[in-house]
Amino acid sequence: MTPAACGIDCRVCRLFILGVCSLCGAGTSREAALKEAAQTRLLGAPCPILACARMNRVAHCLRDCPSFPCGNFHSGPYPFSRGFLSMQERRRAEASPAKSPAGGAIQVPQAHWEAVTAMDRKALCRRAGAFWEPPDRIRIPFFKDELRVDLGKRFVFQRAGMSWDRVRDPLLELECLLYLLGVKEVPLRGRMVGVMELKTAHFFQGPHALNVEPLLRRFGTDLDGFCRSAQALGGKALRLGDAAYALYPFPKIPLYYLLWEGDEEFSPRVSILFDETIEAHLAADAIWGLVNLVSHRLLTAEIPRA
């Protein structure tokens, strides 16, 4: 038994203890299906939050739905106050993995822009698996979408439907420039390596150890959620672990995420692997930043609604 899709924990409610009210359960649970049927039968319509979670296979809205808090919460008298919903919106907008290895704010050096601008455009695009848009724009595949690097304006844009939105995440801007600066004409070898197999393994210790705790909290007992998030990013399924995907933030830089789901006996486990060529393209701090970027994208993936 788990808290309801909306976030209320019915198990600690006296109405449930006295048998007056039944459990709602997670949106993907049998309890939720029974509750929705009972509400429809007795009230004529189910709770819109529960119905939405069931339809979209969302276990818990606060954790799993990128649209939270949606209109179902804002228009209803419960379960949360307007103050709580406003706080959620504000803090979610502020959430970002944009921290440097030293823990400070990410800064994008103008020297990086100058160095990319000075490169031969055609040769750079050939190495990077990118596309040149004369006179000064480069398009780079990014997961299943695209980025546009505007060398004239010195901005990075991400495709948003038929338009382009300016990227305001300094980590993404920095990683994009570092990829263009470092990418080599080296083909992928198809051999996966762990972080401790890299030549710069000593960097990834202590405060620079890859942070998998948020992934474990989110996906440790939700294999389906992990798969749906990876697929939303265009991930290619691999036959490893309980579930595994190859994710391509940039054409020459696949990252492999492997998940072993937890149960009553074993704790969940996440491994992040790389193609052995990654150090030909990126320095250790750039690899560390890219992992943070990709993990954050997994945690906040926009999963298509049913």
Image: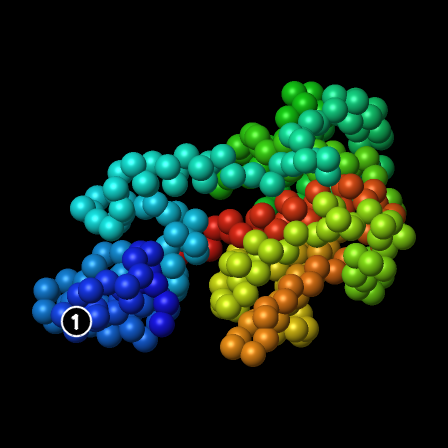
Of all residues, the one furthest to the right in this rendering is 199
Percent coordinates x, y for residue 22 in the rendering:
21, 71
Q: Quadrant of the N terminus?
A: bottom left
Q: Residue at x 65, y 73 (%)?
A: 241
The answer to whether residue 183 is seen in the rendering is no
Relative height, residue 257 to residue 135 (above, below): below
Whether residue 53 sits left or right of residue 222 in the image: it is: left
The answer to whether residue 46 is seen in the rendering is yes
Residue matched to label 1: 18
Percent coordinates x, y for residue 257 in the rendering:
66, 61
Relative height, residue 31 to residue 292 (above, below): below
Q: Nearer the viewer, residue 95 or 179?
A: 95
Relative height, residue 179 to residue 154 (above, below): below
Q: Quadrant of residue 34?
A: bottom left
Q: Quadrant of residue 190?
A: bottom right
Q: Residue at x 57, y 48 (%)?
A: 297
User: Dot 1, crowdedness within 10 Å: few (<14), some or many (≥20)?
Assistant: few
Percent coordinates x, y for residue 99 in the rendering:
65, 36
Q: Quadrant of the C terminus?
A: bottom left
Q: Residue at x 71, y 56 (%)?
A: 255
Whether residue 301 sits left or right of residue 149 in the image: it is: left
Of all residues, the one furthest to the bottom in this rendering is 265
Question: Label 1 amino acid?
Answer: Leu
Mark 1, secondary structure of its residue: loop
